[in-house]
Amino acid sequence: MIAFIDDHRCVYGVGPICRVLGIAPSTYHAFKAVERNPDLASDRARQDRLDMAAIKQAFDGSRGRYGARKVWHQLRREERAIGRCTVGRLMKGMGLQGGVRGKKVVTPNPDTAHPCPDDKVNRAFVADMPNQLWVSDFT
């Protein structure tokens, strides 16, 4: 939304755009103030920025194999005080995911020995008016 407001603020102004989008103009101005001066960010946002760099370093050190739990253990070995849920939240926000173990999920295949039921509506599931077409399946 911020990029949209930046693109159109010279034509419409910040206030009318924010009114249509349903956000307060002060939200936009606060975001831009933090963008200009990162020291104005909240303590959590500043700490998250530092933690994200450490998480990225630990994730890259494992060659992308560690998930949130193992990254958290690695950070604890490096004596960084960070919560496991925080590591999971930040990794999710950064789009990082560790290797997934286990078998690939296979969807069920239809049994070709049994005949398929007749198509009563010829795959036309569109009705012109309410209560014109009812489809049910009793299996």
Image (cartoon, rainbow, N blue to C red):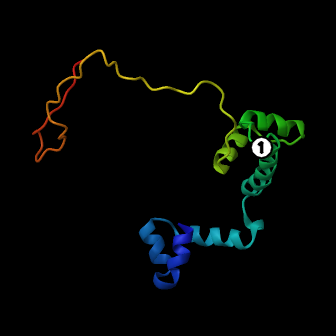
Quadrant where the image shows the C terminus: top left
The amino acid pointed to by label 1 is Phe
Q: Is residue 72 left or right of residue 110?
A: right
Q: Nearer the viewer, residue 101 or 92?
A: 101
Q: Dot 1 surroundings within 10 Å: few (below 14), some, or many (20 or more)?
A: many
* Up-down relation of residue 135 to residue 31 (above or below): above
Q: Nearer the viewer, residue 97 or 108?
A: 108
Identify residue for label 1: 59
Q: Is residue 71 left or right of residue 102?
A: right
- In this view, which residue lies farthest toward the top? 113
Question: In x, y percent, where is residue 131?
Answer: 11, 39
Question: In x, y percent, where is residue 3?
Answer: 56, 70
At mark 1, the secondary structure is: helix
Question: In x, y percent, where is residue 108?
Answer: 42, 23
Q: Nearer the viewer, residue 11 or 137?
A: 137
Q: Is residue 139 left or right of residue 2?
A: left
Question: In x, y percent, where is residue 59?
Answer: 77, 43
